[in-house]
Amino acid sequence: MAPHPLSSAQQQSVEQLLETMTLSEKIGQMTQPEKNSVKPGDVTRLSLGSVLSGGGGNPDPNTPQSWREMVGAFHEEAQQSRLGIPLLYGVDAVHGHNNVVGATVFPHNIGLGATRDADLVRRIGRATALEVAATDVRWDFAPAVSVPQDVRWGRTYEGYSQDTGVVSELAAALIEGFRGDGWATPTSVLPSVKHFIADAATTWGTSRRADRSTLATDRTLAIAQMGQSFVELLDLGAWQIDQGNSEIDEATLRAVHLPPYQAAIEAGALNVMVSYSSWQGLKMHAQHYLLTEVLKGELGFAGFVVSDWEAIDQIHPGDYDRCVVDAINAGLDMVMVPFDYERFIASLGRAVQSGQVSESRIDDAVRRILTAKVALGLFEHPRTDPALLNLVGCAEHRTLAREAVQKSLVLLKNVGDVLPLDPAGPELLVAGEAADDLGAQCGGWTISWMGGHGPVTPGTTLLEGLQAAGGQVHFSPDGVVDRDYPVGVVVLAEAPYAEGMGDRSDLSLSADQVALLERVRARCTRLVVVLLSGRPLIITEQLPQWDALVAAWLPGTEGQGVADVLYGERPFTGKLSFDWPHSHADLPRRPEATLLFPLGAGLTTDADSIRFPGLQDNAKV
């Protein structure tokens, strides 16, 4: 249990401020709308406590300076309210300040989990905090401390590992990086530890998020920009497990999914975001036992609890007032109401006046929110130094991201030591559109909610990294060539996705990908496959045809980090942070499952060249 974040004098100042606040001002502090919905003057008029940018909630033009100007305008409005309570602006900077064009985009968490390097993650947290703070933002909806149990889940890549201990260690390190020299320093950024709890243990087929009959009127899903229609994605498995029901018992919940939250609190976390999912049939946003008795009581969490995007609406669909009452009474302190913030304010006001929500519950919520704001030093320094803008996407941060990429790669097969490649060797064939696709390399949560293809932000693709290394490289996006090559490198990628839009019932390679592999295999003596993905894919049938396999995950903007390791400038050191299933029959994860590669697998190419025991047999090569 962490000590209280405030001194006795600071706690007294919070109580004094609370005594001066009207009920309307308190409810305003509990309200968090999305920036595109906020009408001019409403931050002042309603004493709104927070504003957020949703995934892709960017200014136009999307530049660091425009971000700072946009966020700063909300801060200035908050200062004009009766009490001048500073605003907390929140963003989803889940792998760097990833909504900002030009920011450094680090590998997604699944790649960082493969590094097992807490110091690296701590340094990434510090760099991310500096870039976030540069845009006048002091709240980041990260880290996800999920412990994924079924890689068909579209948020698998947001989890560091299926190993609770790895998740706990790396999440605490990221929080320490966000904090820097102390929460009250002007470059600290408040982490939002998410999504409480067992969001990664839901059962396939239990999600009720996407209703085919209401897709045309769903304002949230309308924001998503995908290459396929919603109906096509639903047929592929979208929204089958994300936001579903976790049917595990309490002992499993406590042993597997609770420890990362305890580690985060001990590291100083002052905010927790609640999961859309349910536990044993009850929506997490209505779980008084888990939110109030366990999180705030047993774990001694002194910070505040925030809802996810429009999530309280799911408690009792069609009865909004009842949703508000149950969520606040369960322990929600701030509610993310992206579109209809005045409806929430009015509903909660009625609930207090009717006695359905006590004033003491309101005071507890606002006390927790003010505690975080005081701890962050926002009352003394509500704005950050504009000189920080020079750090957004700076060379030092990109070098750090390149290091993270190098350490995240997992070598799972290397017959005849085809890797590392020789940059002075014969011409290398590189095939697959993904080799030169920065968007595919970054994945979801990059500039837009779902991510995209192509040059979505400044960075270096894997192909550009290979070319810059000095070797002879022939690139064929479709793998059609008119001569043979000693070595071919095929880069395969999942299409970018986020959240339930990435749930998939079938994790096999596509027919086009298999055809590409066959074309290149026929033209190469040896074949290396680099897989860009947010999870293990089912590759058992194709693997025997490959001489080498590299799991590169979603490495972000610094693709030369992949090239560094392929060419032997840096060794392969990454280890799987997830079991790699042999077939779809082995999902979800369970002890008796057959594995293609086990958790911890990974070959090395350093001087000692340690191979994982039994790996060749497991891989059937």
Image (cartoon, rainbow, N blue to C red):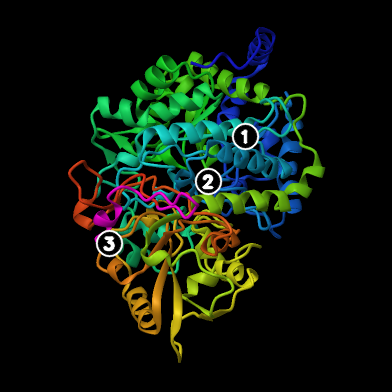
Disc assigned to residue 596: none
Q: Earlier in the sequence, mark 1 or mark 2?
A: 1
Question: As rendered, which of 218 and 423 lies closer to the eye?
Answer: 423
* Amino acid type indicated by mark 2: Phe
- Is residue 115 visible in the rendered image? The answer is yes
Tell me which numbered mark, 3 or 1, is placed earlier along the sequence: 1
Q: Residue 16: image x %, image y %?
A: 67, 11
Judge from the rendering whether residue 181 lies leftward or rightward of residue 4; answer left or right.
right
In three-dimensional space, the C-alpha distance between marks 1 and 2, rounded to whole angstroms, equals 29 Å
For the record, the magenta segment spans 603-621
- Which of the two discs, 1 and 2, sits closer to the camera? 1
Give the residue displayed 63% in from the left and 54% down from the top.
58
Residue 318 or 181: which is nearer the viewer? 181
Can you tell which mark lies on residue 339?
A: 2
Q: What element carries label 1?
A: helix
Quadrant of residue 541 in the image?
Answer: bottom left
Residue 356 lies, in percent from the top left, at 41, 20
Q: Mark 3 points at which residue?
A: 506
Task: Name the disc covering residue 178, or none.
Answer: 1
**Up-down relation of residue 482 to residue 363 (above or below):** below
For label 3, the SS is loop
Q: Is residue 243 above or below residue 547?
A: above
Q: Which amino acid does label 3 sit on?
A: Asp
